[in-house]
Amino acid sequence: AGVLAIASADPRLSRELSQRARYRAEVISRADRFLRANLEGRFTSERLCHWVGMSERNLQIHFKEALGMSPKQWQQRLALNLARQLLV
């Protein structure tokens, strides 16, 4: 909340935060598409990072900040949801 209050007072900071949020959403979206397309195969962080175009650490940071979990945890949730849908 404090960051948002400061950002709203400075239009440049507000614009920068918006750009970061859009970039993070784009990164998460690309990673999500890769993970959904590869639910049947083995997940490797190396392949995912290559697909998204960033280091493993940066990708983990984006996932933690956006979703509160690692890419591996997200992939596991996707796989479990798929299994649940197939069982239903």
Image (spheres, rainbow, N blue to C red):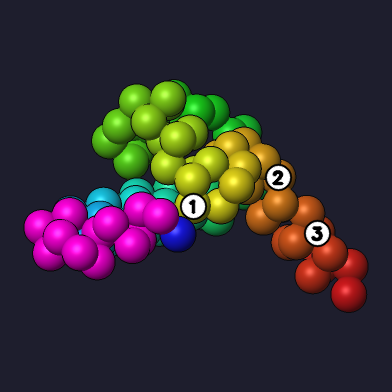
Relative to 8, 88 lies left or right: right
For residue 9: magenta?
yes
Identify the image quadrant of the N terminus: bottom left
For marks 3 and 2, the one nearer the N-term is 2
For image coordinates 56% across by 52% down, the residue present is: 67
Mark 3 residue type: Ala
Q: Tell me if mark 3 has few (under 14), some (14-19) or many (20+) residues whose alpha carbon lies within 10 angstroms of its own.
A: few
Q: Residue 79 in the image: x percent, y percent? A: 71, 52
Give the answer, above or below, for where 75 lies relative to 42: below
Residue stretch rendered in magenta on the structure: 2-13
Q: Is residue 10 magenta?
A: yes
Residue at left 27%, top 35%?
53
- Can you identify the residue that label 3 sits on? 83
Taking the image as shown, residue 75 lies to the left or right of residue 77, namely left
Q: Nearer the viewer, mark 3 or mark 2?
A: 2
Give the residue at mark 2. 76
| x then y, percent, for residue 81 | 75, 61
Q: Amino acid at mark 1?
A: Ala
Residue where numbered disc 1 is placed: 66
- Locate the C terminus by quadrant: bottom right
Q: Calculate the distance from the C-alpha at mark 1 to the C-alpha at mark 3.
A: 24 Å
